[in-house]
Structure formats: structure tokens, C-alpha cells
Image (spheres, rainbow, N blue to C red):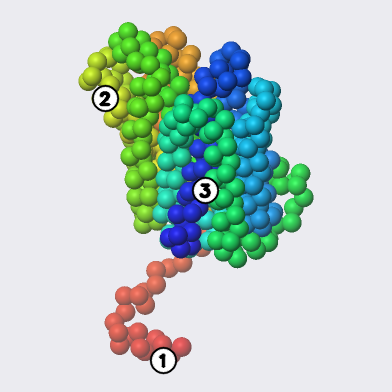
Amino acid sequence: MSRRLLLLLSLTSALGVGNLYFPQAIVPLVAAGLGTPADRATLVVTAVQIGYTAGIFLLVPLGDRLPNRPLLVTLLTLSAVGLLAAGCAPNLPALVAASVFIGATTVAAQIISPMAAGLVPADRRGAVLGTLLSGSIGGMLLARTFGGTLGERLGWRAPYLVAGVLVLTLAAVLSRALPGGAAAPPATRQSYPSLLAEPLRLLRAEPELRRSALYQATVFGGFSAVWTCLPLLLAEPAYGLGAEEVGMLALVGAATMVCTPLAGRLVDRRGSDPVNLVCLLGTLGAAGVLAAGGGGGTRGLAVLALGTLLLDVAMQSGMIANKTRVYELRPDARSRLNTAYMSGGYLGGSVGSWLGVRAYGRAGWPAVCALVALLAALALARHLTAHRRRRRPIAPAEGTLIPAPDRDREATPAADRGRRARQ
């Protein structure tokens, strides 16, 4: 794993994640261009997310069954075809169908992550995963700006067509740049139906996978609740801000791109559990900071910026710690482990958004912050319980012979030489 290859894989992750988010910025342009109501045009965004969820379930497990290099290049090529087809769509139904296809095939980041974990030694795995995650964060943050700026100047089709050309070019570059280890056939020969069922079996068999998925589900659930309800808070009279200001506030999360590689190196030095502990405590702290930002005004906006930044860093850094732990469980099943882990995270995010909207409707912004704190406390309680279990000594069963102390350890050097001579 050279630095050049790592940069290339990070760029691939950024483009893959960006394809999920740039349609959000051009929904009004799509509605105007295709002559359809804006609420119907939002189906494009929903379709991409549905396709992405399907891709995680149906395609990511293939990373353990097929050689990674041709699999990744094929997925990128298909994604480029979908983007070009979307850019040429004559009507909304065709665009929605192309969006589902784009979402399903743009799971490149979820293929790259397990592949990269297998190309580096264990003591570099956290740092590499942190760098790849930085690329994904950059793609997520810049995609809306890319889509909105290009769409305003050249029309809504331009972002799709430009993204399609970029992804197709990247597929050609990766076909030559990926090392032979990424093309070697994986060990498993399971049938496709068995491969799809394997993530559920792994969840039952691996307690550490369940623990990591719980951490991600709870923290990402709180993260989703905050970002789902934040536009509602900023639209209230206390702030009176619109969607553009919400987008600018989201750019604060760009600092996470610097923090995630540092968190990855810390995981390599200290292990996953200490980093998880700090991240869970950071999520609790973020809930308190965000609760203080509901008053409005410039001060309230600054507090919200600080709280969302702390929450972003805690969530993304915790993801690196969790993935590093998960990938160490079964080196021959990293893609299936990643499918199980990410499915748990996305499920938690969906539930968190649903609970957040209802909490906001009943008791406002303080209830959303209380939900974030409750979810983080649940994960923290599980973490502390696991830590105590590992430290608790195991008592010998009744009737078990306990060996006597090894007195030779305390012997003098001369006595030690005599003992070895007798042996």
C-alpha cells in the first residue's frame, strides 16, 4: 500500500460517496428542467439511498467471493454508465430508475475498506482506514457544492455527465494501479445465497461484531437525529435561517478530515477500546453543547457549530475504531463483516432520524439532545460492561488443582544453574 495508491483509493471513496449526495443540491433544478413538482423530484434522492442500501446487502459480500480488482473496476464502470444514463434521462421515472442503479453500484467505498485492510499490516490498519474515511468525508461535504455550482451554470444534467466521465476515468486508472493482491481469488467459495445470509450468521457468532455494530448504531442514530432536526431548529424565529446556512454549517465538519487519520493512528497505538471510550464520552459532551445552542442568535449558532463538530469527530473516529476491531475478527470474511456492521449502522441512523423528528415535535430541540445523550449512554454502559468482563479474573472450577508457585523464579543465579544441570 503505497501513498500514491492510498491517495487513489481515497479519491475513489470520495467520488463514490459524492454520487450519493450531489443530487440533493440539484432537486429544484431537476424539478424545473423536467417540469415536475419539487416534492416529486425528491424521489431522485430517495432512490439513490434505496439503491445504496440494496448494494450493501447484495454486492458488498461479493468482496469475499470475487477478486477485488475486477469487482471494483466493474462496479465503477457500471456506476459511470448509470450516471451517464441519468444525465440523458428524458423524464423523471427514467431518472429515478437510473438513480436506483447508481446507488446500488456506487458501493465502491464499502469494497475498498475491507480490501485495503487486507493489503496492510495490522499496525497500519487504523491509519489507512482513517485516511480512506477522510476521503469519504471530503466527498460528502464537497458533493453538494459541486452539484449545485455546476447545475446552476450548466443545467441539472451537467453534474451527472461530469461525474460519469470522472468515475469512468478512475475505473481505467484503477484497473492498472491496483496491486496483484487485490486481484487474487479470495479463499471462500460459498454460493451467492449462502454469502448473502452470512452477515446474519456472523452477527450471531461474533460478540465483538455485535458490540461494534451497537456502538455505530447508537452514535450514528444520534448523529442522524441532530442533522434531521437541525434545519427545523434553524428555520424557527430564534434563528430564521434557510437551507443555504444549514449547508454552510455542515462545512464545519471538514475539520473531521484532519481528525480521522489521527484517530486511526491512535487506534494502531492504543487499540480500539480506548478510542471508543473517548468517542462515546465525546458524544455525550456534544449532546450537552448542542443543548446549549437552542437559544438563537450569533452565540447560539457558534455553540451549534462547536457541538456538531464534536459530534462529527466522535462519530467518524468511533467508526475507525469499530471497523479496525471488526476486520481483525475474520480476515477471510471482511466484506461480509463490513456488510453486517454497516447494516447495523444504517439501521440505527434510520431509527435515530425517526425518533429525532418525533422528539422535536413533542418537546423541541432539548428533547433531541436528550435523545443523543440517551443513545450514547446506552453504548457507554455496554462498553464499560465489556471492559469489566475482560478485567474480571476467572475463578477455577471446583476440584481444579491450582499449581504451586514456581519457587525457581526466585532462585539465585547459582541455584538456577544447578537446577538446569540436574535437568
Amino acid found under the numbered disc labelled 3: Thr
Report how far apart the C-alphas of labels 1 and 3 lie in the structure.
Answer: 64 Å
Amino acid found under the numbered disc labelled 1: Ala
What residue did someone put label 3 on?
12
CB under 8 Å between callouts 1 and 3? no
What residue did someone put label 2 on?
303
Q: Earlier in the sequence, mark 1 or mark 3?
A: 3
Left or right: where does residue 200 sit relative to residue 307? right
Which label number is shown at residue 421?
Answer: 1
Report the residue that reaches farthest toward the bottom: 421
Instruction: Identify the residue at horizontal 26%, vertical 24% (top origin).
Output: 303
Instruction: Identify the residue at horizontal 74%, vertical 53% (top origin).
Output: 190
Q: Secondary structure at mark 3?
A: helix
Instruction: Identify the residue at horizontal 30%, vertical 27% (top origin).
Output: 305
Instruction: Identify the residue at horizontal 65%, vertical 22% (top origin).
Output: 92
Amino acid found under the numbered disc labelled 2: Val
Residue 239 is situated, as x and y percent measured from the top left of the image, at 31, 13
CB under 8 Å between callouts 2 and 1? no
Report how far apart the C-alphas of labels 2 and 3 lie in the structure.
Answer: 34 Å
Q: Secondary structure at mark 1?
A: helix
Camera-near label (1 vs 3) is 3
Is residue 240 shown above or below 260? above
Residue 263 is situated, as x and y percent measured from the top left of the image, at 36, 48
Q: Earlier in the sequence, mark 2 or mark 1?
A: 2
Camera-near label (2 vs 3) is 3
Report how far apart the C-alphas of labels 2 and 1 lie in the structure.
Answer: 73 Å
Q: Is residue 316 visible?
A: yes
User: In which image quadrant can residue 51 be found?
Assistant: top right
Residue 151 is situated, as x and y percent measured from the top left of the image, at 49, 28
